[in-house]
């Protein structure tokens, strides 16, 4: 059992809040200056409790309080009792991962949330050393203190809806007497299958060249490549085993290098010759055009031009002849070098063939250097594809022959557990019907645990609860209230329940439902005065008329542990979250 005792700070920043057994009300009230009851700190008060109970710093609103409004070195303290052991949990905003827990005046310091959570789990599940058979401390707390931003619209999802955190069934199953190690194994194997599926999809995409080939075509390609590589390897090994190979190997490789260089030079020469041949012919200018141009210049320049027209023609002819001589000589030189290169290539190629014939029949290897290059390239390609195919087959076999049968076995175990726990599930449904009758005035409700048919379902287990006229926002909240109360008070589930429950602003419902819910709480407190602790935040204006009419059996004033107004807020400050 978990029993909260007191929430406070050191140094004092807000008035300490003391909790008691039974129903505890944190009220948002009107004041003389303001009739508004929202935004006075009810939810923040619950956040401080949750912060001390190790809520993640990333999701805690406490971490968003500005430093200039609330000193971050302030010690936030929560006194509580877990299974008759008195503890104090101390946490600061400036160092949220460092937790101090005081037990029997002994300080125990933790460097991480997980370490502190493990410690509190050991205190809560003191008789269950095996962690696999019970939830973690924080898993349990997430069910006992649902996030207000979960909007209370789902039985199993207790988290902020905007964060899209998947529902955690473990604390629910634990309370209903399921062996949660089976469900944990199911989640683990399902996740492995999911990862394997993604890996296989990516591998297949690479192997089939983005789906352009079929997998069987790739297998055929591997066989063909294997045959080619074997033939090349046999030819190369045949050469190497030949006694003459060692004596001519160096000559062959030198010849191949020389031939490569000569063929590169041959290509360069052909390119140079092509460039020269593509040059335009010297432009032909008629004597008439030269004469006209000459006379124009002569008129403009007068006696400055003494040369005759014939001198100009001779000068042009010299320039043309000079250009033609240079181009022609260059062309002749390049052509001669090209012919000589071709001749040398022919001689060396003939010599290479003659040497190769002495050690190879020429059927496989036409060129030693090229053959080795092709062999290496094809070997590399073969090894890559073969590795991918092998990896694909192994992953596919692991998924089909190991993971899926394991998952199917776990599904059978889960179904078996549903049958074995039928008495508890039926009893739990009856508790829901009893509460439903008090609040909704009928027993038109149901609760079942089913399994999902879809093989893609990550949870497999489905909690199905229906209540009268459900579907609307307010009725869904009522459904969650009834479900949570049933977990705390059912004869079977209460044996494992910590008997602590906190609801922050759950009663956004019609007035009759609110009144009947409060009356139900009053009745439970009469029946089990020291057996539970329920903390509820509530706006006073929602129940003022009903209080005056005296139709609420629960004494609001005597159950009020804190009263906040616009003038007397929880933290006494106005701020915007960081």
Image (cartoon, rainbow, N blue to C red):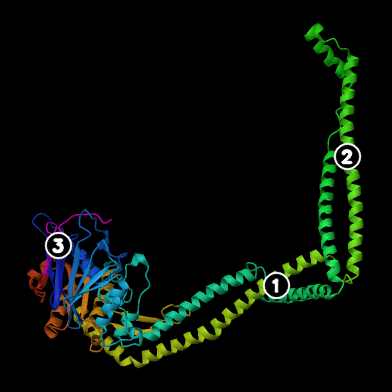
Is 202 included in the stretch rendered in magenta? no
Residue for badge 3: 11
Whether 497 is drawn above or below 388: the answer is below
| Res 153 visible | no
Residue for badge 2: 331
Q: At x 37% / y 70%, what residue is drawn?
A: 165
Classed neighbour count for the residue bearing mark 1: other residues with Cα under 10 Å, few (<14), some (14–19), many (≥20): many
Q: Closer to us: mark 1 or mark 3?
A: 3
Classed neighbour count for the residue bearing mark 3: other residues with Cα under 10 Å, few (<14), some (14–19), many (≥20): few
Is the Cβ of the residue at disc 2 closer than 8 Å to that at disc 3?
no
Residue 245, x across and y down, in percent: 85, 71
Q: At x 14% / y 76%, what residue is drawn?
A: 23
Secondary structure of the residue carrying numbered label 2: helix
The image quarter in which residue 356 lies: bottom right
| Res 346 visible | yes
The quarter of the rendered structure image containing the N terminus is bottom left
Q: Is residue 149 left or right of residue 329?
A: left
Q: Is residue 379 left or right of residue 263?
A: left
Range covered by the magenta-colored residues: 561-578
Identify the mark nearer the N-term, 2 or 1.
2
Whether 340 is drawn above or below 74: the answer is above
Residue for badge 1: 382
Residue furthest to the top: 303
The quarter of the rendered structure image containing the C terminus is bottom left
Identify the mark nearer the N-term, 1 or 3.
3
Residue 370, x across and y down, in percent: 79, 64
Nearer to us in this view, 29 or 293: 293
Secondary structure of the residue carrying numbered label 3: loop
The image quarter in which residue 413 lies: bottom left
Is 576 included in the stretch rendered in magenta? yes
Identify the mark nearer the N-term, 2 or 3.
3
Q: Closer to us: mark 2 or mark 1?
A: 2
């Amino acid at each position: 059992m978990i029993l909260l005792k007191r929430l406070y700070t050191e140094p004092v920043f807000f008035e300490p809040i003391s909790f008691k057994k039974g129903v505890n009300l944190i009220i948002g009230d009107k004041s003389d200056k303001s009739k508004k009851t929202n935004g006075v700190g009810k939810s923040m008060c619950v956040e401080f409790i949750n912060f001390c109970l190790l809520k993640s710093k990333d999701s805690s609103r406490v971490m968003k309080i500005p430093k200039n409004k609330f000193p971050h070195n302030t010690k936030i303290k929560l006194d509580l009792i877990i299974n008759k052991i008195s503890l104090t949990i101390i946490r600061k905003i400036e160092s949220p991962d460092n937790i101090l827990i005081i037990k029997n005046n002994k300080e125990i310091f933790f460097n991480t949330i997980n370490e502190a959570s493990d410690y509190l789990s050991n205190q809560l599940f003191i008789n269950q050393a095996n962690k696999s058979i019970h939830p973690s401390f924080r898993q349990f707390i997430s069910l006992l203190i649902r996030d207000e931003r979960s909007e209370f619209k789902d039985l199993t999802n207790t988290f902020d809806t905007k964060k899209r955190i998947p529902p955690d069934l473990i604390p629910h199953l634990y309370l209903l007497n399921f062996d949660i190690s089976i469900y944990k194994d199911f989640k683990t194997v399902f996740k492995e299958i999911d990862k394997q599926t993604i890996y296989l999809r990516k591998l297949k995409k690479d192997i089939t060249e983005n789906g352009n080939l079929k997998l069987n075509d790739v297998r055929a390609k591997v066989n063909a490549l294997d045959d080619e590589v074997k033939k090349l390897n046999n030819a190369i090994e045949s050469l190497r085993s030949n006694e003459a190979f060692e004596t001519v190997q160096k000559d062959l490789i030198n010849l191949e290098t020389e031939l490569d260089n000569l063929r590169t030079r041959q290509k360069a020469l052909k390119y140079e010759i092509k460039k020269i041949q593509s040059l335009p012919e010297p432009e032909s200018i008629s004597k008439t055009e030269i004469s006209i141009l000459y006379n124009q210049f002569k008129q403009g320049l007068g006696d400055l031009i003494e040369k005759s027209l014939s001198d100009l023609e001779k000068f042009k002819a010299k320039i043309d002849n000079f250009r033609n001589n240079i181009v022609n000589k260059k062309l002749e030189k390049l052509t001669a070098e090209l012919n000589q290169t071709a001749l040398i290539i022919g001689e060396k190629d003939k010599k290479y063939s003659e040497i190769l014939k002495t050690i190879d029949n020429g059927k496989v290897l036409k060129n030693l250097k090229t053959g080795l290059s092709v062999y290496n390239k094809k070997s590399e390609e073969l090894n890559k594809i073969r590795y991918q195919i092998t990896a694909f087959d192994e992953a596919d076999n692991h998924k089909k022959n190991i993971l899926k049968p394991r998952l199917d076995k776990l599904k059978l175990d889960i179904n078996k557990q549903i049958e074995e726990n039928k008495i508890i599930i039926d009893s739990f449904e009856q508790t829901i019907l009893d509460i439903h009758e008090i609040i909704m005035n009928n027993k038109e409700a149901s609760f079942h645990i089913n399994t999902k048919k879809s093989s893609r379902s990550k949870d497999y287990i489905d909690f199905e609860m229906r209540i009268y006229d459900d579907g609307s926002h307010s009725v869904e909240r009522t459904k969650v209230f009834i479900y949570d109360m049933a977990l705390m008070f059912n004869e079977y589930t209460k044996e494992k329940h910590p008997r602590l429950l906190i609801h922050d602003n759950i009663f956004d419902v019609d007035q009759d439902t609110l009144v009947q819910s409060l009356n139900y709480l009053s009745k439970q407190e009469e029946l089990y005065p020291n057996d539970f602790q329920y903390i509820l935040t509530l706006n006073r204006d929602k129940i003022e008329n009903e209080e005056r009419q005296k139709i609420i059996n629960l004494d609001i004033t005597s159950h009020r542990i804190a009263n906040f107004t616009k003038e007397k807020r929880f933290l006494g400050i106005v701020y915007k979250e960081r």
